[in-house]
Image (tube, rainbow, N blue to C red):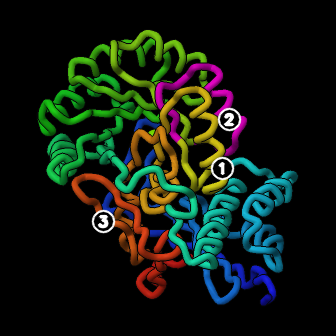
């Protein structure tokens, strides 16, 4: 029997890519996106994982996680995840530490799949071939024409659900949702995301306005730290409107608290933040135990293989900035088919190959 391979050459790179224009939501403005990619080798194969976060993620991977991974058995993904969280105990796991662990964990899963010569959907036990997505953007920095054309473009691609940002100018938010509805027609699901910009009473009052545009999804109407407020809104918003949150979940206890508080109709989970595919699957099990469906937050190319493994998956977020950046950074991004994402099962791992030369000008 040949010797088991061990992990070597863990490397981390980062690129900051300007957005097309300045973008804004209810609580933030940005003009660039930083992508941090971790690669690790074993047995002649290279696994790749990434996160969208601060460049400080690079330091955490390089100084703490790479030395921890090198020399280990690449099949021990769960042990590596556990030890990475422990290793960041004093540095601080949530936030930048969790993003570093997330990128590393996805690289480990990709590496394992490649060593086994199976696709990640196959390795993670896929429940479906085709994954519903929703178009996501609708920034508050867009003018009304820009908002309408972006949302209508997605609907024209066969995507039946679209999300816009609200919360920058609450006095105009009701009107903006009616303008959006006009662009997408009566059949598409209209979703709004306030990014925690409203207070409780304001959020409740605006829900009535959003109901006029038949909004079906109300994301972070108040801060996602206000579990009682989310629960209150969930009980009181007009019928059929769902409350969603969870994108800032770094670990299981966060999702457990949110679910136990009855705060959401749909739990959002982001594998680039919550500890990679390992953390994502843990969160999915928690949501399952609470009879709550799950929606994958952002990074659609990364989420495809693991979202396919979730029986109660609602959808994946087809986020404008990340769709653009993933197409720029990788070959092998699964294209949409009839408005749904179909993960590639023909190649080992997730199938993403870094286009390093094309990204060179953005390297940091
Ligand atoms: Mg959001």
Specify whether 64 is left or right of 159.
right
Of marks 3 and 1, which one's residue comes earlier in the chain? Answer: 1
Q: Which residue is mark 2?
A: 254
14 vs 151: above or below: below
* Label 2: element kind: helix
Distance of label 3 from label 2 (alpha carbons) = 33 Å
Q: Which residue is mark 3?
A: 335
Callout 3 crowding tier (Cα within 10 Å): few <14, some 14–19, many ≥20: some
Q: CB atoms at circles 2 and 1 under 8 Å apart? A: no
**Residue found 32% across the figure and 59% down from its top:** 21
Of marks 2 and 1, which one's residue comes earlier in the chain? Answer: 2
**Residue found 49% across the figure and 59% down from its top:** 305
Q: Quadrant for ligand 1?
A: top left
Q: Quadrant of the N terminus?
A: bottom right
Q: CB atoms at circles 3 and 2 under 8 Å apart? A: no
Q: Is mark 1 within 8 Å of ligand 1?
A: no
Where are the magenta residues, as a range? 248-268
Residue 265 drawn in magenta: yes
Q: Nearer the viewer, residue 281 or 329?
A: 281
Specify whether 40 is left or right of 354.
right
Asked whether residue 179 is in view, the answer is no
Q: Which mark is residue 279?
A: 1
- The mark tally for this picture is 3
Residue 225 place in picture, x, y as percent: 62, 28
């Amino acid at each position: 029997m040949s010797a088991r391979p061990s992990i070597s050459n863990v490397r981390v790179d980062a690129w900051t890519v300007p957005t097309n224009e300045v973008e804004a939501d209810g609580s933030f403005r940005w003009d660039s996106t930083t992508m941090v990619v971790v690669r690790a080798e074993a047995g002649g194969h290279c696994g790749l994982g990434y996160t969208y976060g601060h460049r400080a993620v690079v330091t955490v991977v390089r100084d703490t996680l790479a030395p921890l991974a090198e020399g280990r058995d690449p099949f021990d993904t769960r042990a590596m995840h556990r030890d990475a969280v422990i290793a960041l105990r004093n540095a601080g796991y949530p936030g930048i530490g969790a993003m570093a662990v997330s990128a590393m964990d996805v690289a480990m899963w990709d590496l394992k799949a490649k060593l086994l010569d199976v696709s990640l959907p196959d390795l993670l036990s896929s429940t479906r071939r085709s994954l519903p997505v929703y178009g996501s953007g609708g920034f508050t920095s867009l003018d009304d024409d820009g908002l309408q054309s972006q949302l209508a473009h997605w609907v024209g691609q066969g995507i039946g659900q679209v999300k816009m940002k609200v919360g920058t100018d609450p006095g105009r938010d009701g009107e903006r949702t009616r303008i959006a509805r006009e662009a997408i027609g009566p059949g598409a699901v209209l979703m709004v995301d306030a990014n925690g910009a409203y207070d409780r009473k304001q959020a409740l009052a605006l829900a009535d306005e959003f109901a006029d545009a038949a909004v079906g999804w109300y994301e972070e109407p108040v801060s996602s730290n206000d579990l009682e407020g989310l629960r209150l809104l969930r009980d009181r918003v007009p019928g059929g409107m769902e409350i969603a949150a969870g994108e800032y979940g770094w670990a299981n206890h966060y999702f457990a608290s949110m679910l136990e508080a009855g705060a959401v109709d749909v739990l959002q989970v982001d594998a680039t933040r919550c500890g990679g595919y390992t953390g994502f699957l843990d969160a999915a099990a928690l949501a399952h135990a609470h009879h709550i469906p799950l929606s994958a937050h952002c990074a659609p190319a990364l989420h495809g293989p693991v979202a396919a493994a979730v029986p109660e998956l609602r959808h994946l977020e087809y986020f404008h900035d990340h769709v653009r950046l993933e197409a720029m950074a990788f070959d092998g991004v699964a294209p949409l088919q009839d408005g749904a994402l179909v993960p590639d099962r023909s190649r080992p791992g997730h199938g993403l190959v870094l286009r390093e030369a094309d990204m060179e000008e953005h390297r940091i």
